[in-house]
Image: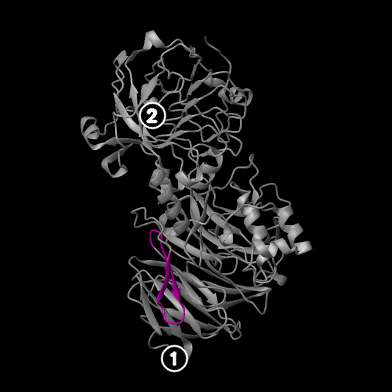
């Protein structure tokens, strides 16, 4: 049966009465299957190398799906993936990789073939006699011939009708690939996807098994014992398999699952997974154990019922209800809301500007304002709630990329900006119009002596002094009121000082972080000739910042080395143990969110923001950034927690495509995403990523 002029998107909306659906090597980016798939028990998406995520409602209409294979996809996010798969009540076998025993791996060494077990040239395929056991019972397979057992309906979809624009969620390759008409029988056992050698062709199995037919496999008590994961070798893994404690997270999050990656899930595995999960992950924020509805929490808050105190006998914090509300909202929003910052240019010109943000900072006292500097040397103050530009400061030929920005706290209309060519200025945004006028731009600004190759500026708590650092071993101290450079502290580190930060409450205490792997604490009252102390990282330090109460230092070194130190003496308080990528160019930045309750961390070689508890180090969630269109790989260039909104942040995201502009993406973990929105855009160039905070 051949259907022409039909797109898979149409079929995914309507549904199909098939039992087996094979979509190997399809070019989905996000999968949406919301039609009626009531009979489907097997879905194969192996080698769909563009597939990165699922739509939230993807699996809501597949109540009988038992077997799902996702090997060699690009899925990475544990949280959104398990939230989507949890909507499959019948799912018993899931695969993101093929586990082979050592002896089988030696028989079938890794190669360019898609199938590890089978030679696609064979017309009669012999399945292994043995497979990993399920719940202590072994599974035996029988040999079968394609023509003898299969009588399926093949459907050729006209791929020319698919949307091929950059906004398309489905893109089928036009390359000719080797295909086979082989399908899986109903109730396919572990190893079922190895029978399938379909590439881009979409096939639907329609074979029903009668009551008197011989089952595809039989259970036995005597043939096979459990295969330990350490004795197996992974083939065709998806990136999610390399996430720390991936298997344990999947087992706990999907309690009905019986087999994961060919390996059965035993009772002891589940018990061990629960322990590991509790040690390394937060199920909900603020150690909440169970999901609650917002309405229920509000009712308890208003009535202050006695039973609430019995449920929470240790409740003492004044933040109890606000934290409970946050936990409830985060728990109900597996796909958090991501919204690119929309900039409304008020200029009357037809050629409206496309800005290229390079650095940004929230305003310290006005929750609606944000300042960002661009790669073209502009400084722009924007109402990030409405998208309207409040003040626009052109470069006027004096600034290159703006890498340093810092608001004054006691004079909230003033901001200091520094560029990579060394230019330093203080601006009063009250005197800066929202559009470039050309004549008044210098009226509200103060120029300071240049600091060559600048990467960072920071103002002290009294707004009297600020520090500048850059691609040198020195730090310069400036007096804000006079505009003079007071002193240059030479050779504070052995390599260049990427970031310098004053403490939030002491006007004389500051910290420096350098690519010499050292973080140092200094006191201006000591001139400073010697650091108060020095803390060492194993890799070059990208940045450092104080917690809002100055109790901790958050240190981020190259390639996801993130640690929290006691600010008083530099002792290690917490190592967040984020998995390294192996890249020496993976510059990592971390900041606090929700005061000092949580830490957000992102790196310039990765598209994910990690959120961890700042007291336990347990991972709460990862937020994946995804742009629209094929090849829309994104990277975290910088990020900041919103100082006024819990579980909210903004991320400066960059695309790998040189033609795309960087963009600031607002993230709200308390709200669900708008499924029709795309996310961020820009270039990926390591000299940009290596500097500034």
Label 2 environment density (alpha carbons within 10 Å; few <14, some 14–19, many ≥20): many
Question: Residue 263 at what x, y percent from top left?
Answer: 36, 37
From the viewer's perspective, tell me whether residue 488 is left or right of residue 407: left
Compared with residue 222, is residue 182 higher up or lower down, i.e. above or below? above
Residue under label 2, please give it.
Answer: 190
Is the image coloured rainbow, by chain, by secondary structure, or in one colour? one colour
Compared with residue 382, is residue 154 higher up or lower down, i.e. above or below? above
Residue 477 visible in the picture: yes
Label 1 environment density (alpha carbons within 10 Å; few <14, some 14–19, many ≥20): few
Tag 2 secondary structure = loop
How far apart, in angstroms, are the residues tagged by discs 1 and 2? Answer: 68 Å
Q: Which residue is located at x 26 percent, y 36 percent? A: 101
Image depth: mark 1 or mark 2 in front: 2
Tag 1 secondary structure = helix
From the viewer's perspective, tell me whether residue 613 is left or right of residue 671: left
From the viewer's perspective, tell me whether residue 359 is left or right of residue 121: right
Residue 597 colored in magenta in the image: no
Residue 174, picture quadrant: top left
Question: Residue 586 at what x, y percent from top left?
Answer: 39, 56
Q: Residue 526: which disc?
A: 1
The residue sitting at the front extreme is 221
Q: Which residue is located at x 66 percent, y 66 percent? A: 320
What range of the chain is rendered magenta?
A: 558-575
Question: Residue 570 at what x, y percent from top left?
Answer: 41, 78
Camera-side residue of 515 and 272: 272
Compared with residue 48, is residue 508 higher up or lower down, i.e. above or below? below
Camera-side residue of 549 and 522: 549
Question: Residue 642 at what x, y percent from top left?
Answer: 62, 63
Residue 400 visible in the picture: no
First reached walking from the N terminus: tag 1 or tag 2: 2
């Amino acid at each position: 049966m051949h259907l022409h002029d039909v797109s898979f998107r149409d079929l995914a909306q309507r549904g199909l009465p098939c039992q087996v659906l094979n979509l190997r090597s399809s070019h989905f980016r996000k999968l949406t299957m919301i039609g009626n798939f009531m009979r489907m028990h097997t879905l194969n998406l192996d080698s769909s190398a563009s597939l990165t995520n699922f739509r939230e409602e993807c699996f809501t209409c597949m109540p009988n799906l038992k077997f799902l294979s996702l090997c060699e996809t690009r899925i990475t996010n544990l949280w959104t993936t398990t939230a989507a798969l949890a909507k499959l009540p019948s799912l018993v076998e899931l695969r993101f990789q093929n586990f082979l025993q050592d002896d089988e791996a030696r028989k079938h060494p890794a190669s360019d073939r898609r199938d590890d077990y089978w030679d696609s040239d064979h017309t009669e395929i012999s399945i292994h006699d043995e497979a990993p056991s399920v719940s202590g019972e072994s599974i035996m397979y029988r040999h079968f011939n394609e023509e003898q057992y299969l009588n399926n309906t093949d459907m050729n979809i006209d791929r020319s009708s698919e949307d091929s624009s950059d906004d398309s969620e489905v893109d089928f390759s036009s390359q000719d690939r080797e295909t086979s008409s082989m399908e899986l029988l109903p109730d396919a056992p572990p190893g079922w996807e190895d029978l399938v050698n379909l590439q881009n062709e979409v096939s639907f199995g329609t074979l029903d098994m009668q009551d008197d037919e011989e089952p595809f496999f039989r259970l036995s008590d005597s043939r096979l014992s459990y295969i330990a994961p350490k004795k197996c070798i992974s083939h065709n893994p998806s990136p999610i398999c390399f996430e720390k404690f991936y298997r344990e997270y999947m087992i706990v999050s999907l309690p009905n699952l019986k087999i994961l990656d060919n390996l059965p899930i035993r009772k002891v595995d589940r018990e061990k997974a629960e322990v590991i999960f509790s040690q390394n992950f937060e199920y909900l924020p603020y150690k909440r154990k169970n999901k609650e509805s917002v309405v229920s929490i509000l009712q308890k808050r208003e009535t202050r019922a006695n039973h609430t105190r019995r449920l929470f006998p240790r409740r003492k914090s004044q933040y109890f209800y606000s934290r409970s509300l946050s936990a409830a909202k985060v728990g109900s929003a597996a796909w958090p809301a991501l919204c690119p910052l929309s900039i409304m240019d008020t200029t009357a010109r037809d050629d409206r500007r496309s800005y290229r943000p390079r650095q940004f900072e929230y305003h310290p006292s006005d929750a609606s304002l944000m300042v960002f500097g661009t790669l073209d040397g502009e400084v722009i103050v924007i109402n990030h709630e409405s998208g309207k530009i409040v003040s626009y400061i052109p470069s006027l030929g004096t600034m290159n990329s703006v890498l340093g920005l810092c608001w004054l706290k006691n004079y909230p209309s003033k901001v200091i900006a520094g560029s990579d060519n060394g230019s330093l200025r203080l601006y009063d945004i009250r005197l800066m119009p929202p559009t470039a006028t050309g004549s008044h731009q210098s009226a509200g600004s103060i120029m300071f002596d240049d600091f060559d190759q600048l990467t960072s500026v920071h103002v002290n708590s009294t707004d009297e002094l600020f520090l500048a650092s850059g691609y040198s071993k020195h730090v310069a101290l400036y007096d804000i009121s006079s505009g003079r450079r007071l002193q240059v502290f030479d050779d504070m580190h052995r390599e260049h000082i990427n970031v310098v930060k004053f403490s939030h409450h002491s006007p004389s205490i500051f910290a420096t972080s350098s690519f010499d792997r050292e973080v140092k604490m200094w006191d201006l009252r000591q001139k400073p000739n010697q650091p108060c102390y020095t803390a060492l990282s194993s890799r070059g330090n990208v940045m450092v910042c104080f917690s809002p109460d100055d109790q901790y230092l958050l240190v981020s070194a190259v390639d996801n080395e993130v640690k929290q130190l006691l600010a008083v003496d530099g002792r290690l308080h917490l190592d967040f143990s984020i998995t390294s990528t192996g890249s020496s160019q993976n510059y990592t930045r971390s900041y606090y969110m929700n005061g000092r309750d949580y830490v957000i961390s992102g790196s310039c070689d990765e598209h994910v923001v990690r959120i961890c508890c700042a007291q336990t180090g347990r991972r709460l969630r990862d937020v994946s950034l995804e742009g629209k269109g094929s090849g829309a790989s994104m990277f975290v260039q910088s990020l900041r927690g919103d100082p006024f909104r819990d579980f909210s942040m903004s991320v400066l995201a960059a695309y790998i495509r040189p033609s795309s502009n960087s963009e600031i993406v607002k993230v709200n973990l308390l709200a669900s995403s708008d499924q029709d929105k795309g996310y961020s855009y820009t270039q990926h160039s390591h000299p940009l990523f290596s500097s500034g905070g």
